[in-house]
């Protein structure tokens, strides 16, 4: 059975539709070197092949800076909101899991989904590395970061940023653990959404094939998708480099 980490699968249970509600011999002149793909330019951390060993406890608050093909945004994580999710995210970021990964499912007004590695070996290692659910303590409001699921206790590496008020997800067990800092949503809302929902419901890529084939699959069929160049922990909140307010907060 195809494993689906789609928020829309949960919405179907609630009667809500997805987006509306988805790479010379001789003396000839040398050619300019071809542009390297993210996967060629940034080999993955081999530690990612052993998920069971990546169990470090996250700081109580920390900031992660995403540099993307559309610009930058920073997420502030509050571990108390969803400790297991925060710890998993911290370990993934610390070992550069998200570098080169695409925003493969962008549905205007709903979610930006990502978290499938650019490298099939890494995706295979994490495909069954599930963590239990966290109780929902924050609502899925605009700018909040949450793990996607395929049912109870199935969180692995996929996440989504809410692009609106998705409070209906709260009762389905989707537990936010972070929030985009003020100004960052300007970048997030520019991420390419033209392909819509993923196959077979829309024109977007198939998640199973992203996992099995990696970045070349996306480059060939969905070249306009935006991606993460780097995602790094910049500091615990409040430390040098860790300033900023959550999106939507008052001065």
Image (tube, rainbow, N blue to C red):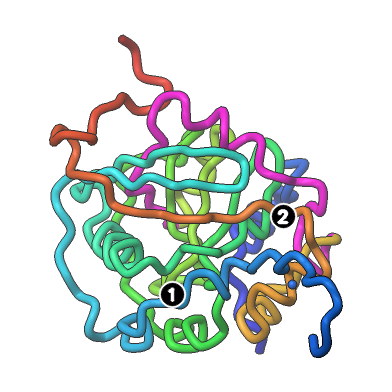
Q: Is residue 191 left or right of residue 74?
A: right
Q: Quadrant of residue 231?
A: bottom left
Please provide percent x and percent y for residue 239: 13, 36
Quarter of the picture containing the C terminus is top left
Q: Is residue 50 left or right of residue 159?
A: left
Graded by Cα atoms within 10 Å as few (under 14), some (14 to 19) or many (20 or more), the crowding at tag 2 reads many
Relative to 51, residue 173 above or below? above
Relative to 231, residue 138 above or below? above
The image's mark for residue 225 is 2
Relative to 201, residue 228 above or below? above
Please provide percent x and percent y for residue 196: 79, 52
* Closer to us: 80 or 102: 102
Q: How many marks?
A: 2
The residues colored magenta run 173-202
Graded by Cα atoms within 10 Å as few (under 14), some (14 to 19) or many (20 or more), the crowding at tag 1 reads some
Report the residue marked by disc 1: 154
Residue in the image at 28% along x and 64% along y: 94
Residue 181 belongs to magenta span: yes
């Amino acid at each position: 059975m195809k494993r689906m980490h789609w928020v829309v699968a949960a919405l179907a249970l609630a009667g809500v539709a997805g987006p509306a509600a988805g790479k010379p011999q001789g003396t000839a002149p040398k050619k300019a070197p071809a542009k390297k793909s993210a996967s060629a330019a940034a080999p993955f951390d081999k530690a990612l092949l052993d998920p069971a060993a990546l169990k470090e406890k996250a700081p109580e608050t920390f900031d992660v800076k995403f540099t993307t093909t559309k610009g930058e945004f920073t997420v502030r994580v509050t571990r108390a909101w969803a400790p297991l999710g925060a710890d998993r995210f911290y370990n993934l970021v610390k070992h550069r899991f998200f570098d080169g990964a695409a925003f493969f499912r962008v549905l205007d007004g709903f979610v930006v989904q990502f978290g499938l590695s650019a490298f099939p070996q890494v995706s295979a290692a994490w495909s069954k590395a599930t963590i239990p659910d966290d109780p929902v303590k924050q609502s899925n409001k605009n700018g909040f970061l949450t793990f996607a699921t395929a049912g109870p206790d199935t969180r692995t590496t996929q996440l989504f940023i809410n692009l609106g008020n998705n409070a209906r997800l709260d009762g389905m067990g989707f537990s936010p653990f972070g929030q985009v800092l003020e100004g960052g949503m300007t970048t997030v809302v520019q991420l390419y959404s033209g392909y819509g929902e993923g196959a077979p419901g829309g024109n977007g890529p198939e998640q199973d094939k992203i996992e099995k084939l990696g970045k070349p699959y996306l480059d060939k069929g969905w070249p306009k998708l935006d991606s993460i160049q780097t995602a790094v922990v910049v500091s615990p909140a409040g430390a040098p480099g860790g300033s900023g307010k959550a999106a939507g907060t008052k001065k």
